[in-house]
Each structure stands twice: as structure tokens, then as C-alpha cells.
Image (cartoon, rainbow, N blue to C red):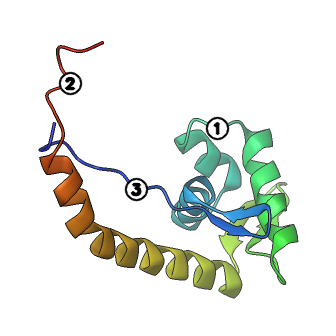
Amino acid sequence: MADQPVTLRLRLLFGDRLVFGPGKGELLARIAETGSIAAAGRAMGMSYKRAWALVEEMNAAFRAPLVLSVRGGAGGGGAVLSEDGQAVLAAYRDLLAAVDSAAEPGVTRIAALLGDMSSRK
């Protein structure tokens, strides 16, 4: 068990509101990669409606929209991260790297104390 990967999940709460976490971070990253909210959602196994709802939630929570979208039409629609969107995604990624690095010694100590759970139910 100790040789299996460990996953830390970081959610940022401001007051009692979840503002940003792994799902929204991945959604922003995939929008940046694909240029599409729909394609980003599909890549995550998420409905178009759910992806749009998350984008709207992020856009409402921050002082400026994180995702800028253009409606479809003859030329097709699309989406890009705003400057603030790029900054939030970069800061979240930096924070994740710092947390992973800081957590490594403690995770290693805990992993060393795990028992063999393969035969337990």
C-alpha cells in the first residue's frame, strides 16, 4: 500500500463558499487547451449544462470573469481564459505544487505505517 500514489485534494473556501477546487481547476485547464467549454466538459465526463454552470459560478465569484465565451454560429463559438482566469489557474497550480512539496514528509511517515489492506474488507 505504501508504494501506491497518494492524492491530495485542495479546495479553497472563502467563508463558507467553495470558490475553487480540483474540478474547477481542471475545467479551466481544459478550456484553455480546447478553446471550448463543451469540449472541456466532455473531456471530464461532464454534461455541457454542468460545465456551463461551473463557469458561471466561477465568473460570478471573482471580480472579473475567468472565462470569456463567444456564442456559436456560422464560425462556431469558443471560449478562452481571461487574464484573471489564467492568473487564477497559475496560482492554483503553484499552490498545489507547494502543498505537495510541504506534505511529502508527513505523507511518507503515514504511508510507512499503513498495513496490508488487500485481504481486508
Q: Which residue is mark 2?
A: 117
Residue appearing at x 72%, y 48% in the figure: 51
Q: Which residue is mark 1?
A: 46
Q: Quadrant of the N terminus?
A: top left
- Which one is closest to the eye, mark 2 or mark 1? 2
- The reply to whether callout 2 and callout 1 are in contact (CB within 8 Å) is no
Q: How many marks?
A: 3
Give the percent coordinates (x, y) of residue 70.
81, 66
Residue appearing at x 39%, y 73% in the figure: 99
Residue appearing at x 60%, y 51% in the figure: 40
64 left or right of 112? right
Q: Is residue 110 above or below residue 29?
A: above
- For disc 1, the neighbor class at 10 Å (few under 14, some 14 to 19, many from 20) is some
- Which one is closest to the eye, mark 1 or mark 3? 3
**C-alpha span from label 2 to label 1:** 32 Å
Can residue 11 be seen here? yes
Among numbered discs 3 and 2, the one appearing first in the sequence: 3
Residue appearing at x 53%, y 43% in the figure: 43
Q: Which residue is mark 3?
A: 8
Give the percent coordinates (x, y) of residue 58.
77, 65
- For disc 3, the neighbor class at 10 Å (few under 14, some 14 to 19, many from 20) is few
- Amino acid of disc 1: Met
Give the percent coordinates (x, y) of residue 39.
61, 48
